[in-house]
Amino acid sequence: MPTTTSTEKQQLILAALLHGIGKFWQRSDSPLFEGSAIKNLDETHLRSFAPVDHNGIPAFQHVLWTYQFLEDFSDKFKKLRLWETSLGKLSELAARYNLPSTEPEKMLQLASTWCSGNESVEAELSVPNGSTESKRLLLQSIFSRAKISGQKATDRTLPVRSLSIEGTKPFLINEEFTASEVEKVHKSYRKLWSDFRDDFARIPTESAEDFLFTLQQVLRKYCSCIPMNTGKVRTINLYEHLKTTAALVTCLHDFSTEKQINTASIKEHDHLLIKMICLDLSGIQSFIYDISSSKAYKSLKGRSFFLTALIEQMTTVLLRETNQHYPNILYASGGKAYYLLPNTEAVTKGLARARHLIEDQAYYEEGGSIFPAMGEVVFGFRGTQVVSDDGLESLGALWKAVSDRASQQKNRRYERILQSSFEDIFSEKGEPALLSGSTDQLCAVTGVPIPKGKGNRLNEGDKDSPLITQRVNDHISAGKKLKNANYLLYANQASHDLSFSKLDRVLGLRAESGEARSGEQRLRLNSTNFLPPAAQQGGYGFCFYGGNSQPDARGRKEVAEFEDLCWYKDSKSGDPQYALLGVLRMDVDSLGQLFIKGFADKDKSFAAYATLSAQLDFFFSGYINIIREEADFKNQVSIVYSGGDDVFALGRWDRIIDFGKRIREEFRDFVGRDDLTISAGISIVNHKYPIYRAAEMAGDEEDRAKSHRFKAKNSDEQPKNALAIFGIALNWDEEFPAVEKLKTELLEHEANGLNRAILHTIQEAYVQSLPDPKTNAVDFSYKWRTAYTLKRMADRYNKNQKAIGDFIEKLNQELLHNDAFGADHYLKLAAVASRWAELELKLKTTANA
């Protein structure tokens, strides 16, 4: 294929992003020959775009709507100089991929086929009406097709609407639609399409790059909740199909241009034309909370936000050095990103430059605390089957291999830098000499040395305030701005010497809207209403970010401190009091296995994996904010970090327990199945306790939850799926409800006169039941002593407060003979319940909580 210009490549990307837009319009329009928006119904014209059946009726009719849409907006594309190039006219390039005649059209067809993973994709419904067919206009949840435990998942669909963290959860549908439900679906499509056209018309055309960026964001908003096709399986959303097709067509374009081959050769031979790259930031959890003092929280949120900016900046460097575009980002969230890039010499050299830039800047500017590990797999296709020189033959194997190779790089952390700069690093030249004592003092937040004459004050303007590093000062500043920010502005990042230390200049947090300049991208945080009404230039979009809304600092215009989360007034004196602080860490169980083995071969495709990743990120980066805004959590829980499938949150200890429970409930409802689970660990400490230790303790509890195995009577063993607290792991389905129920009963009876001594009795019995650490022997005399104590306690209450006496007698019996858990195990659960109740009673004694 002859060498093409960047304008032609941009046109090909644009054609890929819009090649299936006709599916969207067709579903909102009247049937083809019954008053549709298609203006030219000449048979010759129809045959040039879509194959026809024996009755002369076109199949894959959506391409006609695609063609019509592009023709309607031809003036817009002409301003971009993308309407007609040497590749052809945009409307024909995008619409003729089912009957391709030119090489670019064949590329688009091949990319679309690879993306869907199916060479014979079902035709779009031509007349989508009636109960059954109207149901097929709804996007099924990707989780409903996952293979996890053999359990059949509940079939759920998403509402036909624009993407939003409010109201985009999957929901159950009836087996048969009523007439009103059928009309509701069609009405929703008509409104959605009308809104899409309005937003599309407002995209600025001053720059092709900015236009493509904004278009991708508009497509994400409007096409994330509608299916790619209307077949029996409808789990891939239209946006991920369009975006991933664009990524694959750029790989085809660049590879075929460099090798001077055509699509016929690519299909005939097993050309390894694609690189899959995994960028995995190692050390992000410890980076967030590895801070040494009670002053930590001032910078905690800013440190978390910095990681979001960092992965964005690293992605920008990678795309810039390889000369690729935004659709090539398969997924980026939670400190990890995946890319599809052409396997060309130019990209290979660009990747080497990007790797060096990223590593050098992360090492010299972040002190090596974060390591950008990068893995790579090279592959191609045989039909729709993945092929590679490593013998990988499935997308699951590909995904695992590239992730594993990134993980392996973590064991060779900064090897190149250490080898090439050994003398400089381990000498007393430059800033490393800080280690030999040329410092006034340590940073009050991180504990790292501060060079003489440098540093900032923790409390600006207070000369007696402790010193902090410039980077910590940046984090504090970002956290303050984030509290009221609604927009994130990425400045023009074309400079090759742009360093991460200048991220505060690269990005800006804004409370109010404003027009971006050419080359800038303005993203709205946690809202998809992002396009200004009359923007003339710049790129626009949105991003979901877990925790940009933060608790109130008791009226102060700054980031809340730990004591603000735990503060309450004494119910009697009115004096300020501080509850204990809870630290929550949680993530999805066995998520790696879901990507590797979670789909049948016929369901595996890049678009499917991208849809799965996007859905998880939607929950943990977006929807989690809705949970935190609930009244019980709004001012006493702070999300420090949430993205990918991880959550790290702080708050008043009792609210944190409830918050973890709510996340688990909402996640189970979101995925629509019980065998895709989430585990959590909670530590409870004084609000002045070092946060890095509290976070480590919560991590230990999370590990305990991940190691938990629970087996109920007459059922299989359940791994993971647990909350660990007070050093004990509890299965979410069976053990946690039993503990919560007993805790509630203890509190209710205490309110009616039950002596709190019973809590000590239960906890003491559990301690006595543990094996001797030296002999591993158990002194079972605790059983009769506990039974005797509880019997006497029950007898005293049976005289005047029989309800309390009956409760104690029942508890005594459960501790001796429990059918559900066994007596010994039930004692462990009772110990957790009594400790939980004890903490609540301490809080309720002094607070109106």
Image (cartoon, rainbow, N blue to C red):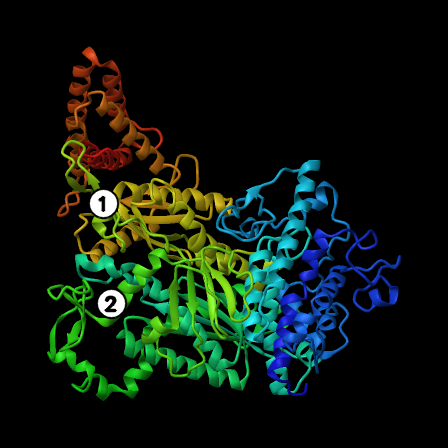
Pick whichever of labels 1 and 2 is earlier in the sequence.
Answer: 2
- In the rendered structure, which amino acid carries the disc numbered 2? Asn
Q: Is 475 situated above or below 497?
A: above
| Mark 2 burial class by Cα count in 10 Å: few <14, some 14-19, many 20+ | many
Residue 473: image tag: 2
Q: Could you tell me which quadrant the N terminus lies in?
A: bottom right
Q: Is 610 situated above or below 495?
A: above
Relative side of 594 to 428, left or right: right
Q: Which residue in the protein does label 1 denote? A: 566
Residue 401, position as x, y percentages in the image: 47, 69
Label 1 vs label 2: CA separation? 25 Å
Do we see residue 488 in this rendering?
yes
Relative side of 98 to 156, left or right: right
Relative side of 188 to 126, left or right: left
Circle 1 or circle 2, nearest the eye: 2
Residue 363, position as x, y percentages in the image: 30, 77
Q: Nearer the viewer, residue 710 or 453?
A: 453
Q: Nearer the viewer, residue 193 or 44?
A: 193
Kind of element beneath mark 2:
helix
